Image (cartoon, rainbow, N blue to C red):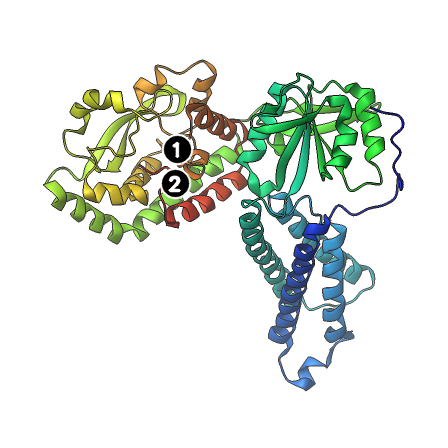
Amino acid sequence: MPDSVRLDGVGRSRTRARSYLAPFLTALRVIDLVFVSIAVLSAQLLRFGSSDRDLHSQVGTVNYTVVSVALIVGWMTSLHLQRSYDGRIVGHGVQEYRTVFHASLWLFATLAIAALAFKIDIARGYVLLAFPMGTLLLLAGRWSARQWLVKERRENRLSDQVLLVGSPSEVEGLVFALRRAPDAGYNVIGACVDNGSEQVAGVPVVGREEDVLLKALEHKVDVVAVSSSAGLGPEGLRRLGWALEGTDIDLVVAPGIMDVAGPRVLTRPVQGLPLIHVEAPSFGGPQLLAKNISDRVLALLLLVLASPLLVGIALCVRQEDDGPIFFRQERVGKDGDTFSMIKFRTMVTNAEDMLPQLMAANEGAGPLFKMRQDPRITRVGAVLRKYSLDELPQLFNVLRGEMSLVGPRPPLPREVAEYEAHVRRRLLVKPGMTGLWQISGRSDLSWSESVRLDLYYVENWTPVLDLMILWRTIQVVLQPGDRGAY
């Protein structure tokens, strides 16, 4: 890295919000202010009434108009202190929602401690109304704003311009990972590698690794992402970090560990060396027990609520060709145990006998058999598959404990017979009615990508991840379009 490059403003304090993102973050502050004000003032009106005499009266020694104004200001301050308006966390992942929740929690914890310390008798009903109402409104506002931002980012707008540094293989992996998550806001515009090639994974190579600083300034990037294999070395990486101080360019280091979620990662600095502790995945404990119980309770509830729909679908399937309503197929579950998976029949009655004749037209990846225009699918079956309604009877499998609501795709025995050793880790948990494969493209996924998503889920499962997948499943099913459902 050239020593002649000097940058002004080294060490000055700077915000992480990009100029292109400033209008969005300003709008986000306004939305938060509106929702916080609605929650606090609604709590005051509901608790103390709406007449002028009641609204401006003092309850004991506390003037709740003053308290409400202070609470609104304090809430907005807490959101800033928790970095809820950091441009690096908006639009992707759960951290944005976590900062909002923590800001609300810290505010009301501070309020409770202050009330106790100064012996201020604040009405509990007022607090119990304002806190959950405000938190829910804030989270709803963030979700709504995120939908708009994600749509923009998928069109390559409102995203950081990223320059990658590392070996060709590592850069290629980073390119694919960032492309899979466009809502994270990373748009790769170039790479610095040392093999002399012109492109890596479709990304132009703009220079060698030692040219990274000059190329970052030349291309006016927002982020320099350095892979673990980069030849800069510890000293070169540290000097790069120093050189980027005072600029609007962030330095991101991508470790060689892939597909490990945050809850399993603990960073512990030792003598200036950031050691990354990776916890082993857990396949038991109270969380798994809670998952099994909630699966069965929700399955029973959904079966009751969806019973009229199930009856209607059954009648349609029966009238199609007078064949059986349900299709039962042997699938492989947890620990390799087989079970009979239930679905509404979507194919002709002799579909399995026709399979050998269609193998030459297989469009599936790996051991999977898929055809976009499968001649065995009935007219009713095509509609059921498009909206995933054929999978509703799997709720009975969940109720019996053979499947989960969320998990890896339930494989066929012939597919499992072709598994490599590492792929068999999919069988460490129950298969699911939906999963990362369902919300990421289903049949359009390559075999390696399908395996990667399933293994990621197996090793990084959390209740929050399950809730996110269930929510995204509803969105995917209700949205028009094929999205790999065939």
Query: From the viewer's perspective, is 356 left or right of 134?
Result: left
Q: Could you say which disc has been placed on residue 331 in the image?
A: none
Q: Position of residue 308 (x, y in %)?
A: 25, 53
Residue bearing the label numbered 2: 483
Point 73% across, 56% down: residue:
107
Query: From the viewer's perspective, is 198 left or right of 366?
Result: right
Q: Position of residue 141 (x, y in %)?
A: 59, 58
Res 123 quadrant in image: bottom right
Placement of 486 over or under 269, stated as above or below: below
Q: CA distance from mark 1 to mark 2?
A: 7 Å
- Work out whether residue 404 can be spotted: no
The amino acid at mark 1 is: Asp
The amino acid at mark 2 is: Arg
For the residues labelled 1 and 2, say whether their Cβ atoms are less than 8 Å apart.
yes
Res 279 quadrant in image: top right
Point 20% across, 35% down: residue:
347
Residue bearing the label numbered 1: 444
